[in-house]
Each structure stands twice: as structure tokens, then as C-alpha cells.
């Protein structure tokens, strides 16, 4: 806020924030209500359209609703308009700098091995259900995956969003750190606000240790950003599931991984022989081979690839 110092204590600064679901519904009605665009629209379709638009500002949402109607064949809101809104939202969120909206295209079958992690995700995902909330269970807060590169940590984030049928947002910590003094703190607050509006969602923070390595030489900016992020993780009330990955945690403060911020911390080691067979099978299935275990000697390949990670096994298949 570029106010002269002599006016800072005399002029109140208001931050309106992004519209929530109720405000978005009113905005949709105000923008297209009374037109043929909303004729015959079911309550279920209206709810999906509102959910798809969450995370946009009022002006952006109004423009996106009108573009969706123009893109439709008959000038009315339909299921196809949801894809149009989502695509527009992806571009707008990407322009914001720190966040990127990822399409959910993976399934649990795309991940070979890691059965304990997949079992934990299947059980913990039930915490988002209304029945669990009524029972008094806390909603999932987050998980941290630590391990050597190439073991599938990033893939796990995409699979988690697919398993839970939630939007996936990727937080680019490199884009958070702006060149202007105070911009980094504002960027992280804006990113957290968008995530809370879109919630429930999965917020994927990839290789988080790189953002805070060597933070002592940047006038404390990285420390302040980390402090803001940690406080938000601890105090947030909205169902934003933080999915953090790290290759090396030596530069991260110990409080980052403590209980209360993450539900669980998993270490991804080199895959076992059985897991290597499962990973090979996944990549061969993507090539649309059938009867893989009968056609290929996966046991022999798995035995010869001891010490290989998932990315290297993919290269072997190629």
C-alpha cells in the first residue's frame, strides 16, 4: 500500500478479498439473471459453475461468466461452460505468479508401490466427508514427503488430488520472492487467500527446501515468508490440504515438520524389488501393452535394476 508515511495512521486500508460461494452465486445472478442464459439451469449445474469460478475476483468472474455463455452453442449455461470457466481460471491464476492450477489426470493405478502411503491417503481422505465432520474428526491438514529425487513425490501430489476429487494448486516458491521490498510477503498471503477461497483443495509445494536454503543473506525475507506460511498452516480453518515435498531437509527448521502442521511425514526410499516390478508394469501399461506379467519377465528386469528410482525405471522402459 503506497501511502505517504504521514497518512498511514489516518487513512484506513480495506482489503475486500475474493468472493466466497454465496457472493459468487449472487454475482452470477446479477450478471446473467433475467437472461435466457440461465433458463432451465438445474441447481446442481449452478453449484458446479459457482465452484468452478471460486478463486476469481468479482470482475474476473463476471467477465468469465459472459465468455462462457458466448462460447456455448445455444447461448445458455451448460456442462461445457464449466470447462470454459476452469480454463479461464487456470490462465488467470497462472498470471497471479505464485500459483498454478493443475488439471487432475492421474489415478491411483499410475503409482507403482508405496502401498502404505496410498492406504493412508484413502483413509485420511474420508476426513473431508460431512459424516466425519459431524462426528468431530478434524479435516486433513497436510502431508510431507521426503526422499531422494525420482521416487515419485510430485506424482503422489497429483494422485492425491485425483483420489479425493479435489482441485490441485501448485505453489511456486520461486515466484513468491519478488524483487520489491515487501512483495514476497504479499505474494504468499495472496496465494494462501486464493487457496482458501477454492478450498477444499490440495496445495502442492514442490521442493520446499530450495525456497528457504541460505535465507540468512536476503535481509530476512525468506524467514518472514516461512514464518507467514507456518503460521497459516497452523491456524488455517479452511480445508486446504498442504502437500509438501523435499529432497533435502537440512536447511528447513525443525518446527516445519512438527505435528500440527502435517498429519504425517513419509520418507520415500529406493523401491524394493516388488515395487520395481509394479513401477515397470505401470509404465508398460501406459504403452497399452496387454498381459504384461505374462509377456515380459519383470522379475528379471527388477533384479537387474537394484538401486534404480522410478524415473530411471521409466527410462529403462523407454
Image: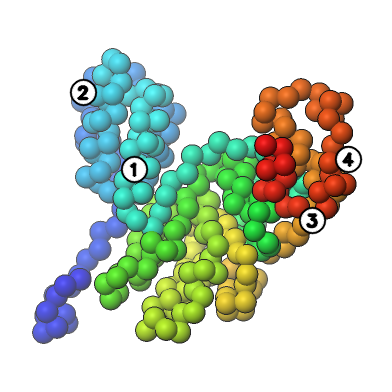
Could you say where residue 53 lies in the image, as x and y percent from the top left?
36, 40
Looking at marks 3 and 4 on the same chain, the residue that comes earlier in the sequence is marked by 4
**Secondary structure category for the residue under label 2:** loop
| Between marks 4 and 2 in the image, the one whose residue lies nearer the viewer | 4
Q: Would residue 36 appear left or right of 111 to someone viewing this image? A: left
Q: Which mark is residue 35?
A: 2
Looking at marks 3 and 2 on the same chain, the residue that comes earlier in the sequence is marked by 2
Crowdedness near tag 1: few (<14), some (14–19) or many (≥20) residues, C-alpha within 10 Å: few
Q: Is residue 233 visible?
A: yes
| Between marks 3 and 2 in the image, the one whose residue lies nearer the viewer | 3
Vertical position of residue 39 compared to residue 100: above or below = above
Q: Which residue is mark 4?
A: 300
Mark 4 to mark 1 CA distance (whole Å) = 46 Å
CB under 8 Å between discs 4 and 2: no
The residue depicted at 33 percent of the width and 38 percent of the height is 88
Q: Camera-side residue: 79 or 100?
A: 100
Q: Would residue 105 appear left or right of 287 to someone viewing this image? A: left
Mark 3 to mark 1 CA distance (whole Å) = 40 Å
Could you say where residue 137 lies in the image, as x and y percent from the top left?
65, 57
Q: Which residue is mark 1?
A: 91
Q: Camera-side residue: 6 or 235?
A: 6
CB under 8 Å between discs 3 and 4: no
Mark 3 to mark 4 CA distance (whole Å) = 14 Å
Q: Which residue is mark 3?
A: 307
**Secondary structure category for the residue under label 1:** helix
Figure quadrant of the C terminus? top right
Vertical position of residue 266 compared to residue 69: above or below = below
Mark 1 to mark 2 CA distance (whole Å) = 27 Å
**Secondary structure category for the residue under label 3:** loop
Looking at marks 3 and 1 on the same chain, the residue that comes earlier in the sequence is marked by 1
| Between marks 3 and 1 in the image, the one whose residue lies nearer the viewer | 3
Looking at marks 4 and 2 on the same chain, the residue that comes earlier in the sequence is marked by 2
Amino acid at each position: 500500500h503506497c501511502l505517504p508515511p504521514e497518512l498511514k495512521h489516518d487513512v484506513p486500508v480495506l482489503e475486500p478479498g475474493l468472493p466466497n460461494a454465496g457472493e459468487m452465486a449472487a454475482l452470477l445472478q446479477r450478471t446473467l439473471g433475467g437472461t435466457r442464459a440461465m433458463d432451465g439451469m438445474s441447481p446442481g449445474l449452478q453449484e458446479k459453475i459457482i465452484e468452478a469460478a471460486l478463486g476469481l475476483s468479482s470482475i474476473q468472474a463476471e467477465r468469465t461468466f459472459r465468455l462462457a455463455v458466448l462460447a456455448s452453442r445455444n447461448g445458455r449455461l451448460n456442462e461445457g461452460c464449466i470447462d470454459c470457466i476452469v480454463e479461464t481460471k487456470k490462465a488467470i491464476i497462472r498470471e497471479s505468479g505464485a500459483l498454478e492450477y493443475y488439471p487432475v489426470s492421474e489415478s491411483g493405478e499410475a503409482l507403482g508401490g508405496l502401498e502404505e502411503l496410498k492406504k493412508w491417503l484413502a483413509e485420511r481422505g474420508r476426513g473431508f466427508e460431512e459424516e466425519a465432520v459431524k462426528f468431530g474428526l478434524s479435516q486433513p491438514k497436510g502431508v510431507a514427503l521426503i526422499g531422494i529425487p525420482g521416487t515419485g513425490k510430485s506424482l503422489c501430489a497429483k494422485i492425491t488430488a485425483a483420489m479425493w476429487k479435489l482441485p490441485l494448486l501448485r505453489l511456486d516458491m520461486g515466484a513468491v520472492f519478488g524483487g520489491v521490498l515487501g512483495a514476497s510477503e504479499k505474494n504468499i498471503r495472496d496465494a494462501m487467500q486464493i487457496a482458501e477461497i477454492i478450498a477444499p483443495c490440495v496445495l502442492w509445494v514442490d521442493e520446499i527446501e530450495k525456497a528457504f536454503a541460505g535465507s540468512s543473506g536476503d535481509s530476512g525475507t525468506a524467514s518472514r515468508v516461512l514464518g507467514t506460511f507456518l503460521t497459516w498452516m497452523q491456524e488455517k480453518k479452511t480445508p486446504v490440504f498442504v502437500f509438501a515435498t523435499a529432497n533435502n531437509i537440512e536447511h528447513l527448521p525443525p518446527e516445519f515438520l512438527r505435528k500440527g502442521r502435517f498429519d504425517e511425514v513419509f520418507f520415500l526410499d529406493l523401491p524394493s524389488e516388488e515395487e520395481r516390478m509394479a513401477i515397470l508394469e505401470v509404465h508398460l501399461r501406459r504403452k497399452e501393452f496387454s498381459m504384461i506379467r505374462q509377456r515380459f519377465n519383470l522379475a528379471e528386469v527388477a533384479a537387474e535394476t537394484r538401486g534404480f528410482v522410478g524415473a530411471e525405471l521409466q527410462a529403462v522402459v523407454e
